[in-house]
Image: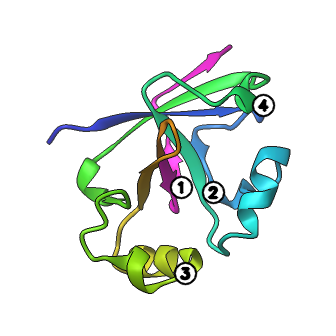
Amino acid sequence: MNKLTIYHYSSRDFKGKIDPKYFGLNSYTRESVKEAEIDRAFFYVGRGREIFLSGAKFCYIAEIEPGKIYDLEKDPKNFKEKFTFNEILTKIKNLGFYGISGNNGFKVICLFKVIKYIDKRRI
């Protein structure tokens, strides 16, 4: 099965894996914590990243099966019409998805689960 290559940027020197439990510790994710209670790690599809990540020291590269990610843009279950963002994340996680994908100008993947990275680069 084809895997999707995803990129995580951080100043934290992670050892072997990216763990969503660190969500909200950075200034740029502190506000996102208020949107939903579920911890999540942000990844980008492709090498682009948002300007507030320009100070990141590391780029972590991981791969994931696309079928494990719920496409929130297409939203095949129409969750956005019925639920709050927090409820949406809870439902998607309870369905067994590893995370969601969306687009905020960048194709973004938010993972709820720990993922091992396959490469780490100092940037």
First in sequence: mark 4 or mark 3? 4
Q: What residue appears at the point 59 percent right and 28 percent down from the top-left corner?
A: 49
* Disc 2: which residue: 20
Amino acid type at image mark 1: Val
Q: In the image, residue 108 lies at what x, y percent?
A: 48, 43
The reply to whether dot 1 and dot 2 touch (C-beta < 8 Å) is yes
Residue type of the residue flagged with mark 2: Pro
Q: Nearer the viewer, mark 1 or mark 4?
A: 4
Tell me the magenta residue range: 109-123
Badge 4 is on which residue?
A: 11
The amino acid on which the numbered mark 3 sits, given as a three-letter code, is Thr
- Whole-Å distance between the Cαs marked 1 and 2? 6 Å
Q: Are marks 4 and 3 in contact (CB under 8 Å)?
A: no
Q: Position of residue 71 (x, y in %)?
A: 33, 58
Q: Identify the disc placed on residue 33.
A: none
**Residue in front for this viewpoint, 50 or 58:** 50
Q: Dot 3, how many residues are within 10 Å of its Cα: few (below 14), some (14-19), or many (20+)? A: few
The first of marks 1 and 4 along the sequence is: 4
Instruction: Give the crowd class for mark 2: few <14, some 14-19, many >=20 residues within 10 Å.
Output: some
Q: Is residue 121 magenta?
A: yes
* Marks 2 & 4, CB-CB < 8 Å contact: no
Task: Using the image, tell me which numbered label, if any, was put on residue 114.
Answer: 1
Question: Marks 4 and 3, Cα distance to the nearest angstrom?
Answer: 31 Å
Residue kind at label 4, given as amino acid type = Ser
Q: Nearer the viewer, mark 3 or mark 1?
A: 3
